[in-house]
Amino acid sequence: MDKSSNSLVFPFDFLSDTSQNRVIYLLGTIAISTIPALVISFLIFTFFPEAEPPPLPESAITLFFNVVIFAPLIETLLLWLGISIIKRFTSSTWSIALVSAFIWGVFHSLGALGHGFTIFWSFVVFSFAFVVWYEKSRNLALGMCMAIHAGQNFIAFLLMQIL
């Protein structure tokens, strides 16, 4: 893939570089995904205090399983299916990531409108990373996307336990 076709500015130049150390990529991408999502969430719930958070289980163990294990696994497999369909209409990594994120935003909005806006950025990152890693290997794409998603959700889980 021509790197310049994917990346014009940070963070997408970082996300496009699948030749870098995978641990650095994973940690960097978790930060790229998580920090803006937290800011978006903060802004939504600050300016729209009546916005409902998504329904979550009360048990910390159930919550951990649902958000850190189950959601990244199932949603990454569904993301792969969605991206496979979107790729039939465009080969642009940007377009694929944006359409995929829009669809995920709509799905997450069904449970809580503000949540759909909060996760839009995250799914741009997940989708973009999936597409660029898929060019190396399907298994790397699946594994990296799941790990990024699980990492972000783990941070969210920890924050929910603290706040």
Image (cartoon, rainbow, N blue to C red):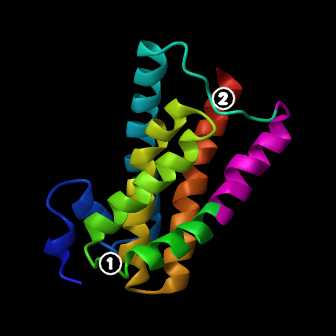
Q: In this view, does 159 lie above or below 95?
A: above
Q: Residues within 10 Å of mark 1 (few under 14, many from 20)?
A: few
Label 2's element?
helix
- In-image side of 123 versus 96 (left or right): right
Q: Position of residue 31 (x, y in %)?
A: 42, 47
Residue at the spot 44% in from the left edge and 71% down from the top edge:
130
| Residue closer to the observer: 46 or 34 | 46
Magenta segment range? Answer: 58-74
Q: How crowded is mark 2: few (under 14 residues within 10 Å), some or many (20 or more)?
A: few
Q: Distance between the residues labelled 2 and 1?
A: 39 Å
Kindly report the secondary structure that dominates the magenta region of the rendered protein.
helix
Residue at the spot 52% in from the left edge and 58% down from the top edge:
148
Q: Quadrant of residue 63?
A: top right
Q: In this view, does 138 lie above or below 108?
A: below
Q: Which amino acid does label 2 sit on?
A: Met
Q: Position of residue 143 (x, y in %)?
A: 57, 73
Q: Is residue 6 above or below residue 149?
A: below
Residue at the spot 25% in from the left edge and 59% down from the top edge:
12
Which residue is under mark 2? 160
Q: Nearer the viewer, mark 2 or mark 1?
A: 1
Which residue is under mark 1? 89
| Residue closer to the observer: 35 or 25 | 35
Q: Quadrant of residue 40?
A: top left
Q: Where is residue 142 in the image (x, y as percent from the top left)?
A: 55, 74
Q: Position of residue 110 (x, y in %)?
A: 59, 41
